[in-house]
Amino acid sequence: AEEVTEAINDIKKKYSMDEQTLTASLKKEGFTLDEYKKKLSEQIILSRVVSQEVRNKIVVSDAEIAKYIEKSKDTLITDDAYRIRQMFFKKPQKPSDRKTAEEKAGTVYQQIKAGEDFASLAQKHSEDPSGKAGGDLGFIKKGQMAKEFTDVLSQMKAGDISQPFWTDMGLHIIKLEEKIEKQSEAAIKDSAKNKLIEQRFSEKYKHWLRELRETAYIEIRL
């Protein structure tokens, strides 16, 4: 009964009708409001049954799952991923200037530790295009990072800020905003399988729904 009431309310909203106008429109189609509600109730039950039947008949092979995973590996969580902010200082051309770079990074690091906003400081001091976005690098998968980054991140939790550290590119200070742990192989396969099932179900269900609409009970033909 609740689902029927919701369906009636959706129809009223869709066609900007009150109950009196709806009743009059139904009368033109040869229905009373109670008859229409009964038909809606029957179709809701039928829809639920067909939904389950369609879903149960969908089969997805291991080969299809593997293909989907390969195609969607950038969106599936196949590796630990980190959302980080970075403060970057370019590597000096002269080794003798390394100390100056370390002092500069150290000063900024102390400002962060004193409570200044990381993003604001990155906009002012970071020698990297991400500085304009407050140092935000977005989510990066573990396998896409330099070893120095993963070593530092392995000791951090969300909200932590690293001390300055060197890579071949220069000096970095990073803030770990969020970590998403990789899914197990079984979880990745389940996720891929469910997405494939939903895609196929949607196609088959829409086809069935189009056929059902031809009975003229799903929506009022105005």
Image: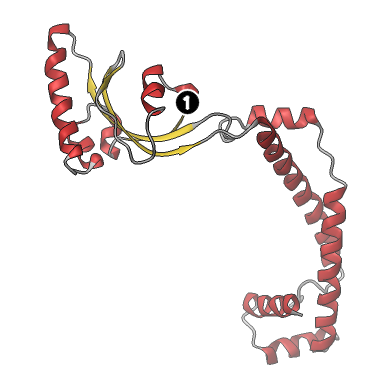
**Could you tell me residue 145's position as x and y percent?**
43, 22
Q: Amino acid at mark 1?
A: Lys
Q: For residue 94, say whether it is visible.
A: no
**Could you tell me residue 139's position as x and y percent?**
44, 35
User: Which residue matches tag 1?
Assistant: 142
The crowding category of the residue bearing disc 1, from other C-alpha atoms within 10 Å (few below 14, some 14 to 19, many at least 20), is: some
Disc 1 element: helix
Q: For residue 131, say whether it is visible.
A: yes
Q: Is residue 92 above or below residue 158?
A: above
What residue appears at the point 16 percent right and 26 percent down from the top-left corner? Answer: 106
Residue furthest bottom as drawn: 20
Task: Left or right? Give the position of 29 relative to 112.
Answer: right
Nearer the observer, 174 or 206: 174
**Could you tell me residue 3's position as x and y percent?**
73, 75
What residue appears at the point 13 percent right and 15 percent down from the top-left corner? Answer: 99
Task: Left or right? Give the position of 15 relative to 108.
Answer: right
What residue appears at the point 29 percent right and 30 percent down from the top-left corner? Answer: 162
